[in-house]
Amino acid sequence: MTSVGTYLHFPGNAEEALAFYAVVFNTNVARILRYGEFNDGNDMSGQSMPEHVKDKIMNSQMLIMDNYLLQGSDHLAEFGDDFQKGNNVAIVLMTDSHAETNRLFNLLVDGGKARFEPGDAGFGYFADLSDKFGTNWMFFNAPE
Amino acid sequence: MSGQVQTYLYFDGQAEEALSFYAWVFNSTVEDVMRWGEMPHGEGSSLPAEAENLIMHARVNILGGHVILAEDALDPSVDPLFEPHTPGNNFAIVLSPETRMEADKIYAALSEDGVQQMQMQEAFWGDYYGQLRDKFGIGWMIVTSAKE
């Protein structure tokens, strides 16, 4: 079936971040694949991977908000990946109620930064935050 | 817990061009367009003339009805609610079309003047997969388990 999801890269703390999101969204991490499990622990050129990257996340998946696929992985300098954290994207959550927005906001903002506390923003009920892993989240609800 | 998940993109003056591009790629239309000049923008603050026509909010529905919302980020000197616009590579939108033909078509359109990071191909885990960064700096992954 046709679908759209979100993929997040992390600089080495993907496991921690995705575990955090699984708690926030009360869901299970459906799959964890580690770099060391791939290609007998060798990189694409056949060289043995450094031990400290074998445990890093190659792919991890979970369903949030019922059926939205959120995936993540570690984007590592050891593999020539130049990780650059941007602020040009946010994941928008349209929840069923202001109470649910408040609840998720409070969980996600722990250790992060609130840019707009849940409240009336003129165009509706709105909230905006950057979590402790640098992922941006926004909430939109109609007035209740 | 139920609800809907959408994607919000910030641009540095190219939101209108980018959304028109996505509307073309996904055979959709840009809707709900509001410009910064239409907004009463904070008491005493002065919106530069060149920002008046920039996008404050707009929407385009892409594959499977997924909603992309977007705006042009204002310079923090104009609106301190903004941080300096910083594109990154820590985010990608994952598209899962129903056929390889549609995956090829979307890949070709989205990667126009962008960076082809991995052309559509059979990946080691069995899916048909490709990855690109479009000309506006947004990352896309296209994946389908379809065999044709």
Image (cartoon, coloured by chain):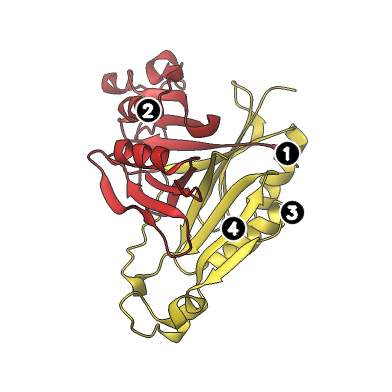
Tag 4 residue: A61
Q: Residues within 10 Å of mark 2 (few under 14, many from 20)?
A: many
Chain identifier, colour yellow: A
Placement of A18 over or under A120, stated as above or below: below
The amino acid sitting under disc 3 is Asn
Chain letter of disc 2 in the image: B
User: Is any part of residue B81 visible from this angle?
Assistant: no
Q: Which mark is residue B2?
A: 1
- Tell me, yes or no, whether dots 4 and 3 are on the same chain: yes
Chain letter of disc 4 in the image: A
The amino acid sitting under disc 2 is Leu
Q: Position of residue B102 (x, y in %)?
A: 41, 37
Q: Position of residue A76 (x, y in %)?
A: 39, 69
Cβ–Cβ below 8 Å for labels 3 and 1? Answer: no
Q: Nearer the viewer, mark 1 or mark 4?
A: 4
The amino acid sitting under disc 1 is Ser
Q: Residues within 10 Å of mark 1 (few under 14, many from 20)?
A: some
User: Is any part of residue B143 visible from this angle?
Assistant: yes
Q: CA distance from mark 1 to mark 4?
A: 18 Å
Q: Which numbered disc flags the more N-terminal residue, 4 or 3?
A: 3
- Tell me, yes or no, whether dots 4 and 2 are on the same chain: no
* Quadrant in which residue B122 is drawn: bottom left
Q: Position of residue B76 (x, y in %)?
A: 37, 37
Q: Residue furthest front?
A: B148
Q: CA distance from mark 3 to mark 2?
A: 33 Å
